[in-house]
Image (cartoon, helix red, strand yellow):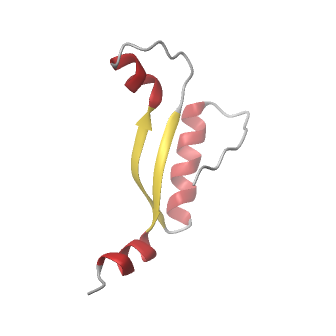
Amino acid sequence: MLIKLSTDKTVSETAAALQAAVQTNQFGVMQVHNLKETMTEKGVEFTRECLIFESVNRNKRRSCTTRT
């Protein structure tokens, strides 16, 4: 699922706020992808700051991984 929102915060400020909100709401961040870094490593010019967060509901994950 993709959720896209606008903000006046910097990318760093937004990332910090998202990390705090995720924990407050009992979710977890599985991975953060830095799209600018990844594209640059592949030789593609990408000038915008972009972070992609993979999050998971900890309680749902636990119930899925403990099913028999």
In the rendered image, residue 37, in percent from the top left (x then y), is placed at 40, 23
Judged from this view, the residue extending furthest toward the bottom is: 68
Residue 32, above or below 23: above
In the rendered image, residue 41, in percent from the top left (x then y), is placed at 33, 19
Task: Please name the residue shown 44% across and 75% down the image.
Answer: 60
Residue 5, above or below 47: below
Quadrant in the picture for the C terminus: bottom left
| Camera-side residue of 61 and 17 | 61
Task: Please name the residue shown 54% across and 41% down the image.
Answer: 15
Number of dots carrying numbers:
0
In the rendered image, residue 24, in percent from the top left (x then y), is placed at 55, 64
Q: In the figure, is residue 42 to the left or right of 51?
A: left
Quadrant in the picture for the N terminus: bottom right
| Camera-side residue of 44 and 62 | 44
In the rendered image, residue 40, in percent from the top left (x then y), is placed at 39, 17
Q: In the figure, is residue 65 to the left or right of 6?
A: left
Q: In the figure, is residue 25 to the left or right of 42?
A: right
Quadrant position of residue 64:
bottom left
